[in-house]
Image (spheres, coloured by chain):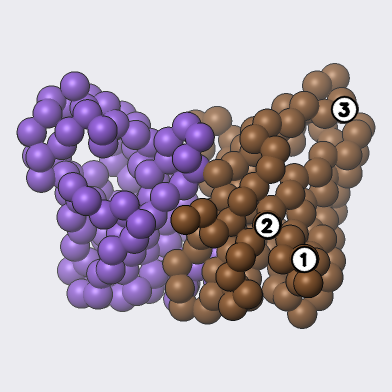
Chain colours: A brown, B purple
């Protein structure tokens, strides 16, 4: 049973465009929603995270939008750059329980 | 530098030959975990440990063992590797639980022939 569904599997965006990756979850007890970024040959690294008491969190060009009623959250990358090309994973968890990861989105930003 | 160190980075072995992948962290983190990453399947948790001498199964524990005798080390043991364990493995640690944010190692690419 996949608890966090991530889409799309792959995404190609022009330089300067907006990249949008979506995730949906089923467990209403989830209270922590991070996004991880993974470059080829490296381990994933925490990019940004949100808790359900806010609907949006922004860090630089990266924004998480959270819709509690729809049980969805998304990552927006503004002014996408070739250096943003990586695989992105969404995840979710309850406190003191293991993180559940989505299957990942491979983003390619082309000039 | 705060980091999670895995060794080896690459390993090719034969079916049935016991192997250990080491993982060490220098951040005094209580929580450590092992994941495998396979194309199309994302990151799947193998085992995790909330503290010394405490380990629990993740989603795909079959064929793996772990131990947590010291806070900093969390080795992954494959007693009798099989080809379906060919994968990219990541060790990760977090301060108390994953809600504090994971630090991942650089990965171990294992091939079992």
Q: Are marks 1 and 3 in contact (CB under 8 Å)?
A: no
Residue under label 1, please give it. Answer: A70
Q: Mark 3 falls within which chain?
A: A
Q: Both on one chain, marks 1 and 3? A: yes
Residue under label 3, please give it. Answer: A15
Q: Nearer the viewer, residue A78 or B27?
A: A78
- Name the residue located 13 percent from the left edge and 25 percent from the top edge: B14
Badge 1: few (under 14), some or many (20 or more) residues near its Cα, within 10 Å? few
Where residue B49 is drawn, which disc sits there? none
Residue B18 position, x and y percent, is 9, 39
- Name the residue located 73 percent from the left edge and 75 percent from the top edge: A52
Question: From mark 1 to mark 2, how far is it between C-alphas?
Answer: 8 Å
Q: Mark 2 falls within which chain?
A: A
Q: Are marks 1 and 2 in contact (CB under 8 Å)?
A: yes
Residue A41 position, x and y percent, is 49, 31
Question: From mark 3 to mark 2, how far is it between C-alphas?
Answer: 27 Å
Mark 3 lies on a secondary structure that is loop
Whether residue B21 is visible, yes or no, is: yes
Q: Tell me which corner region of the image, top left, top right, bottom left or bottom right, holds residue A35.
A: bottom right
Q: Mark 1 falls within which chain?
A: A
Mark 1 lies on a secondary structure that is loop
Badge 2: few (under 14), some or many (20 or more) residues near its Cα, within 10 Å? many
Figure check: B36 above or below A97: above
């Amino acid at each position: 049973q996949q608890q966090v569904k991530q889409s799309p599997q792959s995404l190609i965006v022009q330089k300067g465009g907006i990249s949008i990756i979506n995730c949906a979850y089923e467990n209403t007890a989830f209270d922590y929603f991070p996004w991880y970024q993974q470059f080829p040959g490296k381990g994933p690294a925490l990019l940004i995270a949100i808790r359900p008491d806010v609907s949006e969190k922004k860090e630089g060009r990266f924004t998480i939008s959270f819709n509690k009623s729809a049980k969805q959250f998304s990552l927006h990358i503004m002014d996408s750059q070739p250096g943003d090309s990586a695989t992105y994973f969404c995840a979710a968890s309850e406190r003191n329980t293991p993180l559940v990861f989505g299957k990942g989105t491979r983003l390619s930003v082309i000039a | 530098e705060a980091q999670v160190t895995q060794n080896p980075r690459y390993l090719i072995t034969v079916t049935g030959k016991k192997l250990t992948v080491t993982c060490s962290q220098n951040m005094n983190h209580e929580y450590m975990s092992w994941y495998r990453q396979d194309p199309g399947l994302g990151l799947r948790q193998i085992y995790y440990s909330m503290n010394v001498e405490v380990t629990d199964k993740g989603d795909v524990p079959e064929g793996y063992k772990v131990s947590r005798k010291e806070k900093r080390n969390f080795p992954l043991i494959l007693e009798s590797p099989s080809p379906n364990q060919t994968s990219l493995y990541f060790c990760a640690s977090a301060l108390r639980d994953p809600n504090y944010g994971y630090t991942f190692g650089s990965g171990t690419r294992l091939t079992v022939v």
